[in-house]
């Protein structure tokens, strides 16, 4: 994961120097400050020999890094001069027989469900947080690691796809107001990115640019899979994830084909994560105990009296 972060940093430098992409450094200060605090907390847990808490904080650090480091590669992919594919994606939906306007018309008859699904759509971050924190607390660090590695694999695959298959969204193609007001500026944003002028990335804008495949669906499925082995969370997490996936179409934020592409990518990413993590068991207590003689003694004492 360190290698991935360094690779993304290198790619971002390429985007900065050759594609005219920039960051508002002042806007980055809160993120850098939060990461610094998390690193200090992780170091404190390492010194105290609290392997479980150390693992939780480290996973949070990696998730924060991954969810923010993707900005530069995503905006770099959006710089490619390709036509919008909304019409192609809409035709795919028509061939499947599940078009967004029909779905929206059906759900409009149930306004409470409609409002509920819009709220559910925005709960991906809490689901991801649960997939990051809960497994390590239950001594299942491997589950969180697969979630993080799977997310990296999915991003690695989806960004090149996005570079050639770009779309605004169903609201643009079918001409209805977007469910989230900020998405109304997406068409103009993508158009601006095609120009040669320098562009400053606003990291406070958390709306993704990728339409196909739906990365919202990818992260939802990977998070649910990470929580599946935990019995008391298995079905609540599965139902939660299923509602988020359904909401991507009922809200009109994604085409149906985007969801199917996201599901396929999630399966591929999970398989890749299982393969990569298969022979890499995490032995945090052993690793922490090698950090210093005093820490090794502290870990031994704790293990003796437990």
Image (cartoon, rainbow, N blue to C red):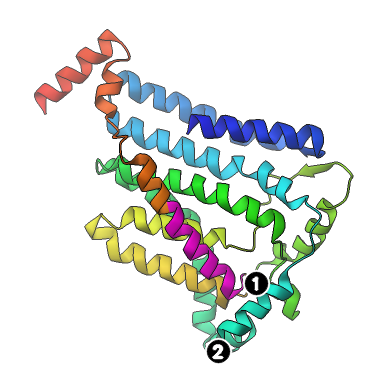
- Reply yes or no: does residue 266 show up in magenta: yes
Q: Is residue 70 left or right of residue 223?
A: right
Q: Position of residue 301 (x, y in %)?
A: 15, 18
Could you tell me residue 122's position as x and y percent? 54, 62
Give me the disc on residue 106. 2
Q: Quick one: 199 or 13, which is closer to the camera? A: 13
- Establish if 133 lies above or below 13: below
- Residue behind mark 1: 179
Q: Quadrant of residue 174?
A: bottom right
Looking at the picture, does residue 63 appear above or below residue 283? below
The label shown at residue 60 is: none
Looking at marks 1 and 2 on the same chain, the residue that comes earlier in the sequence is marked by: 2
Disc tally is 2
Q: Secondary structure at mark 2?
A: helix
Q: Where residue 100 sits in the image (x, y, percent)?
A: 62, 81
**Which SS type dominates the magenta stretch?**
helix
Q: Which residues are magenta?
A: 254-269
């Amino acid at each position: 994961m360190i290698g991935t972060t360094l690779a993304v940093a290198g790619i971002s430098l390429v985007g900065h120097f050759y594609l005219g992409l920039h960051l508002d450094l002042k806007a980055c200060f809160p993120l850098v400050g939060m990461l610094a605090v998390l690193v200090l907390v992780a170091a404190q847990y390492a010194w105290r020999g609290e392997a479980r808490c150390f693992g939780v904080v480290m996973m949070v650090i990696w998730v924060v890094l991954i969810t923010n480091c993707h900005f530069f590669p995503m905006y770099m992919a959006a710089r490619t001069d390709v036509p919008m594919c909304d019409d192609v994606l809409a035709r795919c939906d028509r061939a499947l027989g599940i078009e967004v306007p029909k779905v929206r018309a059906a759900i409009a008859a149930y306004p409470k469900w409609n409002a509920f699904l819009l709220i559910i759509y925005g709960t991906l971050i809490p689901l991801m947080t649960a997939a990051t924190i809960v497994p390590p607390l239950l001594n299942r660090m491997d589950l969180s690691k697969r979630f993080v590695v799977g997310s990296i694999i999915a991003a690695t695959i989806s960004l090149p796809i996005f570079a050639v298959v770009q779309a605004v969204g169903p609201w643009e193609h079918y001409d209805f107001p977007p469910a989230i007001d900020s998405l109304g500026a997406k068409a103009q944003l993508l158009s601006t990115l095609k120009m040669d002028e320098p562009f400053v990335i606003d990291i406070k804008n958390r709306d993704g640019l990728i339409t196909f495949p739906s990365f919202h669906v990818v992260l939802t499925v990977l998070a649910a899979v990470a929580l599946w082995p935990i019995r008391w969370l298995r079905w609540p997490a599965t139902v939660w994830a299923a509602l988020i996936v359904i909401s991507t179409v009922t809200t009109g934020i994604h085409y149906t084909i985007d969801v199917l592409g996201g599901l396929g990518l999630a399966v591929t990413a999970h398989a890749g994560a299982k393969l990569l993590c298969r022979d890499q068991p995490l032995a945090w207590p052993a690793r922490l105990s090698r950090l210093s003689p005093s820490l090794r003694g502290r870990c031994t004492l704790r293990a003796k009296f437990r």
